[in-house]
Image: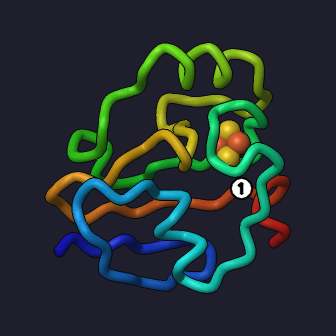
Amino acid sequence: MPVVTILPQNKAVEAAEGTSLLKVIQDAAIEFVTKCGGNAKCGQCHIYVQEGRKSVSKIQRAENELLDTLVGIGSKSRLACQTLLGPENVTVELLGFSSGV
Ligand code: FES
């Protein structure tokens, strides 16, 4: 199973391919509260995928449209709820305004 490393906590967890990064983060006992519960509506699950971007699911239209409305967007930006784990290891960075860090 691929390993997801979560920054800045530097916590590494294994998860099954096809699991959303939001679920991976929440299952890692990291507080990561979102308003929409994973429905690509709130944008609070905005993260940076620092490594393994090519391995995760591709951005779909709903995610892309919501990302366009958020601040701090870059080439590594994804919505954790819409990003599914692929076969390779991934490193994600939680952003201060969404992770409560
Ligand atoms: S959890 Fe709301 S957009 Fe991802």
Dot 1: few (<14), some (14–19), or many (≥20) neighbours within 10 Å? some
Q: Amino acid at mark 1?
A: Leu
Query: Does residue 63 appear left or right of residue 88 in this picture?
Result: right
Query: Does residue 91 appear left or right of residue 77 in this picture?
Result: left
Q: Could you say where residue 82 lies in the image, as x and y percent from the top left? A: 49, 40
Query: Does residue 60 appear left or right of residue 28 in this picture?
Result: left
Query: Does residue 45 appear left or right of residue 93 in this picture?
Result: right
The residue located at (43%, 43%) in the rendering is 83
- Image: 82 above or below 22: above
User: In the image shown, does 75 or 59 lie closer to the viewer?
Assistant: 59
Q: Could you tell me which quadrant the C terminus lies in?
A: bottom right
Q: Could you tell me which quadrant the N terminus lies in?
A: bottom left
Residue 46 seen in this snapshot:
no
User: In the image shown, does 50 or 84 lie closer to the viewer?
Assistant: 84
- Image: 87 above or below 32: above
Q: Give the residue number, with chain letter if any, for mark 1.
A: 95
